[in-house]
Amino acid sequence: MFQALFSLIGQTEAAGSSGGWGLGIAIAGAAVAAALAGIGSSIGINYPGKAAPAVLREDPEKFGNLFLLVVLPGTQGFYGLIIALLVLPKLAPMSVAQGVQVFLACLPIAFTGLISAIFQGKVCLAGVHLVAKRPDQAMKGVIYAAMVETYAVLGLLTSFLLLTNIKIG
């Protein structure tokens, strides 16, 4: 796949157009969307992921309640990946301006994914502590975590709408 992308960049540069630079900038946008959202998810999952095993050690029956709290911060990584995959059909020779448009369209999910996943992980950690003391209140922790998720969804929606309105070619 990478060989095909580099070949496409080389062909457009050999033809004397600036399409290679535009294409490279667009690819960088896709990479930034997936990478930053993924990094945020990795950090976010870290918080409840370290605390949940201690609760499970005391009461393994709480696994179902804890699992949702641990995986919730991972959704932002998927949102970044979705946007990166939506960039792929647009990868064709393009101007630098078009490449910058694609790059900028990827930024909302990159940053909202990065930041919201980290803070959602902290909210989920509080939910893990809630489940440890009051397992019957687990959904309250999930609801608070979902409130943080809202902003990642807004970033996903913004990037999606921006990308779908960029005309290449």
Image (tube, rainbow, N blue to C red):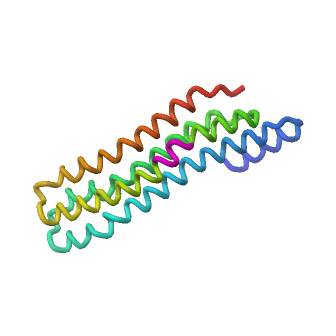
- Residue at 23 percent across and 73 percent down: it is 54
Q: Position of residue 104 (x, y in %)?
A: 61, 40
Q: Position of residue 151 (x, y in %)?
A: 39, 43
Asked if 53 appears above or below 102 in the picture, the reply is below
Split into 4 quadrants, where in the image is the C terminus?
top right
Toward the viewer: 72 or 97?
Answer: 97
Number of marks in picture: 0
Horizontally, is 72 left or right of 16 in the view? left
Horizontally, is 125 left or right of 43 in the view? left
- Residue at 49 percent across and 58 percent down: it is 39
- Residue at 17 percent across and 61 percent down: it is 131
Asked if 149 appears above or below 41 in the picture, the reply is above
Horizontally, is 100 left or right of 11 in the view? left
- Residue at 55 percent across and 31 percent down: it is 162
Dominant secondary structure of the residues highlighted in magenta in the image: helix
Q: Which residues are magenta?
A: 107-112
When asked about the image quadrant of residue 62, the answer is bottom left
Q: Position of residue 95 (x, y in %)?
A: 76, 33
Q: Is residue 110 magenta?
A: yes
When asked about the image quadrant of residue 164, the answer is top right
